[in-house]
Image (cartoon, helix red, strand yellow):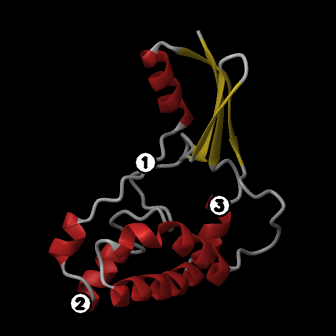
Amino acid sequence: MATTVVSNSVAKRSGDEIPTAVNSSKPTPVIGGHGSNSYSNNSSYQGTVNEAEIDAFNLPIYACPPGEFIKGVEENGFFNVEVIELMNPAPWLKGPIDIPVFVKHVRAAMEGMFRSHFSSEAIDELFEQLVVKLSEISDQMESCYRDGLQLLAILKRK
C-alpha cells in the first residue's frame, strides 16, 4: 500500500483491495482464510506448526471493498473522494501466471513478517507448499488476479 501527498492537498492512495463483488466469506488464493487452500489448515495437519502458534500469529492486512473505503473517508470528514477505481496492478502481464515466480514475489514481500514468529523450516515449507497449492488452482488464480484488484483513490482535502 502506498500513499502519496501531492500539491493542492490531493492525496493518492493505491493498495490491494477486494472488489465489492467478491464474496469475502470464501477464501481467495493467497489471501487465505479457513478453506481447503489455507496454509494454516493444511500445516496443522502436517505437524509443521502447532495450532497455538497459528492462533497467536496476527498478520495485520485488510483489503476493504471500494464502498467501505468511501464510507470511511466520508466518516473522517477531512477529504472528498475525487476518483476511485479498481485497477489491474500488472496489465502488461499476459498468459498464465508463473506460479514459482509469483510465490518468490510474495515471499520477498512477506517473509519478514513470518520470520519473527515461525521457524525458518516452517517458512520454507509454507512457500514450497504455496507453489504446489497455487499450481493446483492456477485457473482460480488467473480469474481473480487479473482485473480490478488494486484500488486507486484520489482524495482532495476539504
* Residue 29, numbered circle: none
Secondary structure of residue under mark 2: loop
Q: Measured from the top left, where is residue 136 in percent x and y?
A: 56, 83
Q: Measured from the top left, where is residue 102 in percent x and y?
A: 63, 74
Q: Quadrant of residue 56?
A: bottom left
Q: Quadrant of the C terminus?
A: top right
Q: Tell me: residue 135, above or below residue 27.
A: below
Amino acid carrying mark 2 in the image: Gly
* Residue 47, numbered circle: 2
Seen from the viewer's position, the closer of residues 28 and 111 is: 111
Crowding near the residue tagged with mark 2, few <14, some 14–19, many ≥20 C-alpha atoms within 10 Å: few
User: Which numbered disc, 2 or 3, marks the residue closer to the eye?
Assistant: 2
- Judged left or right of residue 56, residue 153 is right
Q: Quadrant of residue 7?
A: top right
Q: Which residue is mark 3?
A: 145
Q: Are marks 2 and 3 in contact (CB under 8 Å)?
A: no
Q: Which residue is mark 1?
A: 62
CA distance for labels 1 and 3: 17 Å
Crowding near the residue tagged with mark 1, few <14, some 14–19, many ≥20 C-alpha atoms within 10 Å: few
